[in-house]
Image: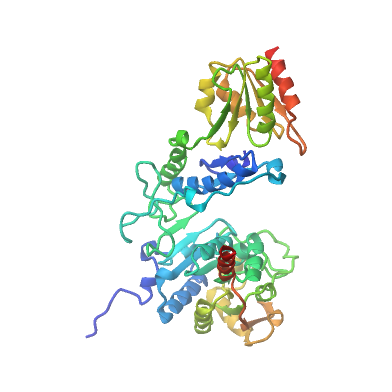
Amino acid sequence: MQCRWGSHGDYEIIALVPASVQEMFDLTIEAFNLSERYRVPTMVMADEVIGHVRERLVIPDPNNITIMNRKKPDRPPGEYLPFQPGEDLVPPMACFGEGYHFHATGLTHDERGYPDMSIETQEKLVRRLCEKIRRNANKIIRLDKLFVDDAEILVVAFGSPARSAASAVATARSEGIKAGLLRLITIWPFPTEELEELSKQLKSAIVLEMNYGQLVREVERAVKPTPVSFLPKLGEEPHRPEEVLSAIRRCKG
Amino acid sequence: MTETSSKHPLDDFLRMDRMPHIWCEGCGLGTTLNCFSQALKELDFDLNRLAVVSGIGCAGRASGYVNADAFHTTHGRAIAFATGVKIADPNLKIVVLSGDGDLFAIGGNHFIHAARRNVDMLVICSNNFNYGMTGGQVGPTTPSHALTMTTPYGNIEHPFNLVALAAASGAVFVSRWTALHVRRLTESIKKGLQKKGFSFIEVIVPCPEIYGRYNKLGDALKMIRDLKTNSVIKYGVPAHEAEIDPDRRIVLGEFVDTEKPEYSDRIRALVERSKGE
């Protein structure tokens, strides 16, 4: 929540949540790629367990790693406007030292990058900053699905609790309960459309968070009117699989 | 009859489409920017190899007026951003132009650690003893007893001595001038531009409209005259002995000029070494 709403003013952000050491590595590369592609800060939000855990990591051959770089200006210095967007609303970005002599500021700015406090400029800028992510949300969002296709009880989790949830969902399936797990890899932008679609087949949803309730409201909003039960976990341990399984059984009734 | 031109010799170094600037009449920030531009001109400095970074505040607006790649960062983060630029492209010379509040209150930790690591950059801090843009609040360099918007009964805190702090933190070049000492300031900026490592120049600038009014220091001319009366030039004294008491005595000069290994060089060497193994 803080990485999304932590500043004043409106903007969209990309935030990724790893659920393993391997993903911590992979998503860090992905974060740089997204950041270059959409010209926006991308956060990698590891929870306490992922931050402390030690497990196997495969470092790929550097030649097999996909690196995305920013769009570069297609015109010479003098004609280049550093904040003039193309159709995808992401302007090409020169690097320092390439002769473009451009100015970037944290203040609201026009297409030249110069500070401009007029209401017209502010509105145009804020709309673009939000829309470039909102319009591309389907390309950015990454989800991990387990038994979701015919699920009637959906567990929504991210980070380390999703690992306990995977185990619980598998056990529930062996008991004949139609449970599924939707693990959010991208927290922001939030997969509202995906959840709205899923809610048509759901009888109930369970949200796991290692806090007292932050993302649960986003889920409630998206799956309405499906009933949502919330399973918070405070302290430094993630949920145990049996706790999640009990919650699934309670939903089954 | 000689031909006259409307072009100023320093126009090439500034974004003339941004003029007029926002600074008040009598403010020393224009002088600092002028000396910086003059130093670039005298060195025939390649503007394609220059990146100017600043923070927030009156002084922070300088990055918007320089005709080079320039970044106006969030409050206090100029040095953090500059460190990133230096590591990404070690061929660039990074100059941080900002103020005392931005660099030493909000950005204080970035300053001491970049100096300790010896990241190659020239930091020029215009010190006007208060937060001017927001109406004259107390800051880390406000002298004891001085009146500001937020210290109407006088400042009860002790101010930083910026050159002593820079020297103690590990800067390789440290000097202090005022907006009156333009030739010496320009020479120090030229040295800083050519120096490899973390260089720091403090420029005492009059703020007649805000700080001057609160403390009844007179108009800009009077404030400049006081800077002349109260300043003493002492090259080479230890930085911690370079007193600063604006009402009484300000010690000016170059206090540190030394060499030590630079941070981005060491990163590159480390990367090469790791690849070799």
**A209 to B166, vertically: above or below:** above
- Examine the image and state in which quarter residue B210 appears: bottom right
Q: Is residue B138 visible?
A: no
Residue found at x 62% / y 63%: B101
Q: Nearer the viewer, residue B122 or B104?
A: B122
- Residue B97, image x and y in percent? 53, 68
- Residue B255, image x and y in percent? 64, 83
Left/right of residue B163 with respect to residue B86 in the rendered view: right
Spot the residue most to the left: B1
- Residue B75, image x and y in percent? 58, 57
Left/right of residue B169 with respect to residue A225 in the rendered view: right
- Residue B268, image x and y in percent? 55, 67
Spot the residue most to the front: B277
Residue found at x 61% / y 61%: B136
**A164 to B170, vertically: above or below:** above
Spot the residue most to the top: A253
Left/right of residue B19 with respect to residue B96 in the rendered view: left
